[in-house]
Image: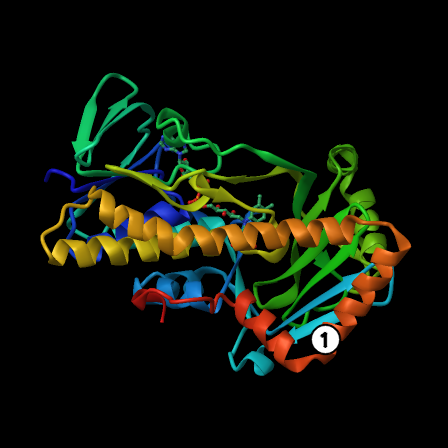
Amino acid sequence: MRAEVLIVGGGMVGATLAALLGEAGVAVTVLDARPAPLAKSDLAGMPPGRRVSAITPVSQRLLTGLGAWEAIQACRVTPYTEMRVWDAQGSGEIAFEAAQAGVAALGHIVENDVVLAALEARLATLPSVTQRFGAVIEGLQTEAGGAAHLTLEGGETLSAPLVVAADGARSRLRTLAGIDAAPHDTGQVAVVTTVRTALPHGGVARQVFLPTGPLAFLPLTLAGEPRYCSIVWSTSPEEAERLVALPRAALGEALEAAFEGRLGEVDVIDDALAVPLVQRHAERYVRPGLALIGDAAHSIHPLAGQGVNLGLMDAAVLAEELLAARRRGIAPGNARILARYARRRRGDNAAMLALMDGFRLLFGATHPALTLARNLGLSGVDRATPLKRLLMRQAIGERGRLPLSCR
Ligand SMILES: Cc1cc2nc3c(=O)[nH]c(=O)nc-3n(C[C@H](O)[C@H](O)[C@H](O)COP(=O)(O)OP(=O)(O)OC[C@H]3O[C@@H](n4cnc5c(N)ncnc54)[C@H](O)[C@@H]3O)c2cc1C
């Protein structure tokens, strides 16, 4: 079957778009450089992956509609009903509770590989979707009339009315298309690992703002035991290098001290990994025959756990626009249709990127006046019910006009 849409990058975002289009019978080919798909059977019995995401209730609705959430739940997923954020340099603290937002959970912590395995299993059931692995893209050409041609390593060429770049933060397609996305170095590196704590997490996602950056303990329940956390410790590159080189016992002590012992003794159960944190925003999301989604369009500091949720929303909005156009007989690479997608997504993503920058700068500041303002602000927001409710709705993904697949 000739593809109507070629998706480069079968990560969580690209696979979601493929599933949304495939369910409507659109002929889609997903190309990924990875050598093979992930199988859920490979994950069962494995230690948890270090890369996890906080999936919002809105993203959960999208994945449920695609039939992927059931498979995710059957594997490993931890709901959290409370978020607690505090400032290590003062007394300010804020707590968000699911009941205040009128939801059963504020979100779920899920390993990225678990989400991906569930989506890949769903794609395998859709007859109009082809998944190709070990496919490395070397060339891209787009036509003003809205068609695109890809050249793969080895010389094979593929053409379709639309190519979607879902190939992550360092998108090769974005570079080949000459779309600028100047990196904005946050000056931080995330140290990620998994720990077991003496005290149970109680379904609470916790984050402390240290002078060097935020440290998050994201709750994980393994084999029914609610005493595990995924760690995302954003700090200076020098400190990250030092932390990653520590023996596990010493890293556990450093984590316990930085976290003010809130979950008691900390046992590190996996090697720590350092991930540089670079924010990027593509100067444009589309051109005729090409659309950027997910991290290929924007990468964001993980402090509010929004990255993949924004990408899933890109996929849902792009699918909605393409399917509405298809019903009217308009081809997927049409410039007007793609512009509608860009208009609906770029502003929301830009606002979230700016908010993350603001948080990072405010909490990184050591000036006493800013420290005071920050603490008064945190505690003030905690007491101001309408503002707190607004922030909670943002955090759970209830922003603007949601695509139908997310309502
Ligand atoms: C430390 C850390 C913590 C985070 N925590 C959260 C969180 O709690 N919540 C949240 O929402 N987000 C979080 N994020 C962000 C989230 O991980 C990303 O937004 C998400 O993974 C992006 O998904 P994607 O599908 O767009 O890109 P990727 O996951 O990067 O997938 C890209 C895919 O493209 C393929 N590919 C790449 N290049 C090519 C090529 N040339 N040819 C073919 N295929 C190619 C890759 O193999 C890959 O499968 C976090 C990020 C970091 C760094």
Residue at the extreme right of the image, as rendered: 368
Q: Position of residue 265 (x, y in %)?
A: 81, 58
**Which residue is at a point 39% across and 31% down the rendered structure image?**
174
In the drawing, does residue 244 fall left or right of residue 303?
right
Judging depth in this view, the residue of 231 and 357 nearest the camera is: 357
Q: Percent x, y for residue 131?
A: 25, 40
According to the picture, the residue beneath numbered tag 1 turns out to be 382
Q: Quadrant of the N terminus?
A: top left
The answer to whether residue 283 is above or below residue 143 is below
Drawn side of residue 25 relative to residue 116, left or right = left
Number of residue marks: 1
Residue at image coords 36%, 71%: 407
Q: How many residues crowd mark 1 within 10 Å: few (<14), some (14–19), many (20+)?
A: some
On the image, the x and y values in percent for residue 198 come to: 77, 63
The quadrant in which residue 331 appears is top left
Q: Nearer the viewer, residue 382 or 312?
A: 382
Question: Residue at left 71%, top 48%?
Answer: 233
Image position of 279 with respect to 114: above or below: above
- Residue 146 visible in this rendered orientation of the protein: yes
Residue reaching furthest to the top: 154
Q: Residue at x 36, y 38 (%)?
A: 9
Cβ of mark 1 under 8 A from ligand 1: no
**As rendered, which of 173 and 48 lies closer to the eye?**
173
Q: Amino acid at mark 1?
A: Asp
Dividing the picture into quarters, in which one does residue 263 lie? bottom right
Display colour scheme: rainbow
Q: Secondary structure at mark 1?
A: helix
Asked whether residue 39 appears in the rendered view, the answer is: no
Give 352 or 244, whichever is nearer the viewer: 352
Image position, residue 102 (x, y; %): 52, 82
Left or right: 391 as drawn, with respect to 323: right
